[in-house]
Amino acid sequence: MEAALPPPPLPQRVQILSESGLANLPSSYVQPPSLRPQPHSHSHVAPSGPSIPTIDLSSSDPAPQVRRACSEWGAFHVINHGVPPSLLNEMRSVGVKFFESPMEQKTRFGCDLAVGPAAQGYGSRMLARDDTVLDWRDYFDHHTLPLDRRDPAKWPDFIPNYREVVTQYSNEMERLAKRLLSIISQSLNLPPSYIEDAVGDVYQNITVSFYPPCPRPDLALGLQAHSDMGAITLLIQDDVGGLEVLKDDQWVLVQPLEDAIVVILADMTEIMTNGAYKSSVHRALVNANKARLSVATFHDPSMVRKIYPAPPLITAENRAKYKEVLYADFAKSWYYGQGPDGERNIDALLIQ
């Protein structure tokens, strides 16, 4: 049963906390000891050890590198990707300007969670459950594709060129995502359009996340560990950094790389590749002294699509590892089931 009087918007509480310089972190943001960030997470010194691969898309044949990165990491940087660096900077810039704006301006575009957990607009809590530890994060979620979901009138109007920048960014991310899905398909000897055809009429959301300075970054997370539910995610971050990916049960910090875009494989691609490529478990850290901003573009299947392992990849020796799933049902389970608390909903689809 819903409470008759909902609490004040969480974004305001986060902003008050971040501006007040509180030395203690409210218990609702404190992660269990096993989920807290590792010591290197709070420094700006690059940790020793591996990092995600970097792939130059201007090379004559990036498919072998993509295959290796997808099978070993599930995440990688791409450079020379064709998206103008000026647009990446503009997208970050309008995002920062929005979150630095007065609260009364931002709440004019607040999301209505009564519509659903992925409601468009400004908010701080995307999941419906009340029992999870809170993320130290504000966000603005834009519905951008298909075009009948795109309504710039629901995006901020008080920042010059905001709507135009998001629209252009959406179009560039769609183009790049389709190019990458073609390379991923070919890397498994599938037809170039296989994954794009399986995805259908793509659902694209662009989420700008803002992580205020946190009084206890050793106890909190900006975004808890999770794998994304769709096909592929394209992410840019600022020079503060804070994205970590899970590799061989160890968290690896993704150091910011100028003009690069982080590619993160999501659950539906793991299913379509029959587990040859794994979706990447990742999380976001927070910083004691600096705010951080990232922009994630989710390239997801149509809600009416059924997703299953690609038949050409199934043999007597390599049987199907995942059950078929209607994407709308999987998305519902992601938001209302386990979602981002370290669990992967996709594991429920494994064929025993």
Image: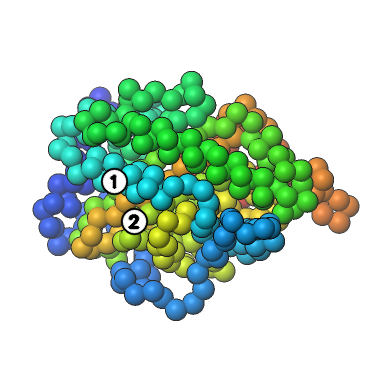
Residue closest to the eye, 190 or 220? 190
At label 2, the amino acid type is Asp
Q: Where is residue 155 drawn, in percent x and y?
A: 32, 29
Q: Residue furthest bottom?
A: 48
Q: Where is residue 206 drawn, in percent x and y?
A: 42, 38
- Mark 2 surroundings within 10 Å by alpha-carbon count, few (fewer than 14), some (14 through 19), many (20 or more): some
- Mark 1 surroundings within 10 Å by alpha-carbon count, few (fewer than 14), some (14 through 19), many (20 or more): some
Q: Where is residue 240 drawn, in percent x and y?
A: 31, 61
Q: Where is residue 118 drawn, in percent x and y?
A: 42, 33
Residue closest to the eye, 140 or 161? 161
Residue at 42% across, 35% down: 168
- Quarter of the figure with residue 349: top right
Q: Residue furthest left?
A: 20
Left of 42 or right of it: where is 277?
A: right
Residue at 46% across, 24% down: 149
Looking at the image, can residue 102 be seen?
yes
**For the residues bearing labels 2 and 1, Cβ distance under 8 angstroms:** no
Q: Quadrant of the N terminus?
A: top left
Compared to 124, does 256 lie above or below?
below
Q: Secondary structure at mark 1?
A: helix
Compared to 272, does 222 lie above or below?
below
Q: How many marks?
A: 2
Q: Earlier in the sequence, mark 2 or mark 1?
A: 1
Residue at 64% across, 31% down: 200
- Quarter of the figure with residue 95: top left
Q: Secondary structure at mark 2?
A: loop
Looking at the image, can residue 223 be seen?
no
Q: CA distance from mark 2 to mark 1?
A: 10 Å
Residue closest to the eye, 33 or 80? 80
Q: Which residue is mark 2?
A: 238
Q: Which mark is residue 93?
A: 1
